[in-house]
Image: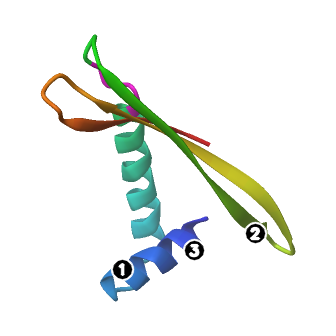
Amino acid sequence: MWQRLGGVVETLTGKSLSASAISRLNGNLTEQFEQWQGRPLPAHYPIFYLDAVRYQVRHTEATDPLVILAVLAVDLDGKKELIALKA
């Protein structure tokens, strides 16, 4: 897993990271995502958008479908907020 994350970082930044730096980055991203998932939400959203994206994910020689569901809401001020992502 860390090798793929390292490839993404290198592609985006042009810099190569050590395995320990990638491990810390992965832990930080995981912690931030979990905090985002557990955040309190306003009590009322007048509009919800639901969508899904289907990907083919390669595992060695086989590929499997992966569907990611997304929920986007619009609050009373018209501000859009990503509410949830679920694989």
Q: Amino acid at mark 2?
A: Arg
Q: Does the magenta portion include 11? A: no
Q: Amino acid at mark 3?
A: Gln
Mark 3, other Cα within 10 Å: few <14 / some 14–19 / many ≥20? few
User: At 17% across and 33% down in the image, what residue appears?
Assistant: 78
**Disc number lying in front (2 or 3):** 2
Q: Can you tell which quarter of the image residue 62 is in?
A: bottom right
Q: Is residue 17 visible?
A: no
State the mark number for residue 3. Answer: 3
Q: Dot 2 corresponds to which residue? A: 58
SS of the residue under disc 1: helix
Left/right placement of residue 32 relative to residue 77 reads right
Mark 2 touches mark 1? (CB < 8 Å) = no
52 vs 17, nearest the viewer: 52
57 vs 48, nearest the viewer: 48
User: At 45% across and 57% down in the image, what residue appears?
Assistant: 26
Q: Earlier in the sequence, mark 1 or mark 3?
A: 3
Residue 23, horizontal then vertical, whole percent: 47, 61
Distance Cα–Cα, label 1 vs label 3? 14 Å
SS of the residue under disc 3: helix
State whether residue 82 is above or below residue 3. Answer: above
77 vs 1, nearest the viewer: 77
Distance Cα–Cα, label 2 vs label 3? 15 Å
Mark 1, other Cα within 10 Å: few <14 / some 14–19 / many ≥20? few
Image quadrant holding the C terminus, namely: top right
Q: Dot 1 corresponds to which residue? A: 12
Q: Which residues are magenta?
A: 37-41
Image quadrant holding the N terminus, namely: bottom right
Residue 17, horizontal then vertical, whole percent: 40, 78
